[in-house]
Image: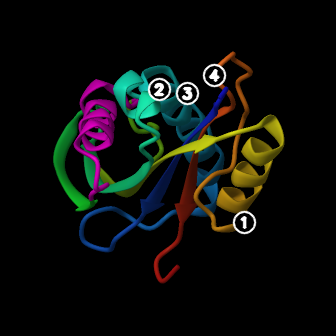
Amino acid sequence: MRHTVTKAAAIVALLISGMAAPVLAGEDNALHSWQKKASQSIDTVMHYPAMALRRNKEGFASFRVTIDRSGDVVESEQLERPRNGLINGAAKNVLRKAEFPALPADYDGETLTFALKLNYAIASSALQARSLKRNLEREGRVTGREIVSRSGPLTASIELLEDGD
């Protein structure tokens, strides 16, 4: 049976008072640019583990991540773990390998804290892959660009939230 792989990643930036400055109107464009670059970094390093694919294993992982002004991860915590160790290892590798861009010059905070959400799903057809992608988008887990490949759609995005969201 041929499978289509849907890999989804979403980064949600939680601008937390005390840890990061609130988003100001002038910072919006710069943060949206940062958002796009960070999503591209996730796209580049997120891969479905071959053994997990052969065994039809799926999973979802989320991390709380804090980066400094240069884009280096200064703190991370895994909030949700997939049941499958191969998927969990792949998700941890995404966080280790991702090269987050430096924070924009006009961003006031010294750090930015966000949630990184990674979803690994297998579809048995292209139709089911599209349906999975739509469902993930509706849940807020995935928005963003689609990369066409023989293994299926790959998506990654960053959604910036204001305090209280």
Identify the residue position indicated by label 2 in the image: 41
Sequence order check, earlier mark of 2 and 4: 2
Sequence order check, earlier mark of 4 and 1: 1
**Pointer 3 with pointer 2, Cβ within 8 A:** yes
In magenta segment, residue 87: yes
Q: Which residues are magenta?
A: 81-101
Distance from disc 1 to disc 3, alpha carbons, whole Å, reads 21 Å
**Pointer 2 with pointer 4, Cβ within 8 A:** no
Mark 2 surroundings within 10 Å by alpha-carbon count, few (fewer than 14), some (14 through 19), many (20 or more): some
Question: Label for residue 40?
Answer: 3
Apparent side of residue 4 relative to residue 82 in the rendered image (left or right): right
- Amino acid of disc 3: Gln
Identify the residue position indicated by label 4 in the image: 151
- Amino acid of disc 2: Ser
Residue 108 makes an appearance in the image: no
Quadrant occupied by the N terminus: top right
Identify the residue position indicated by label 1 in the image: 138
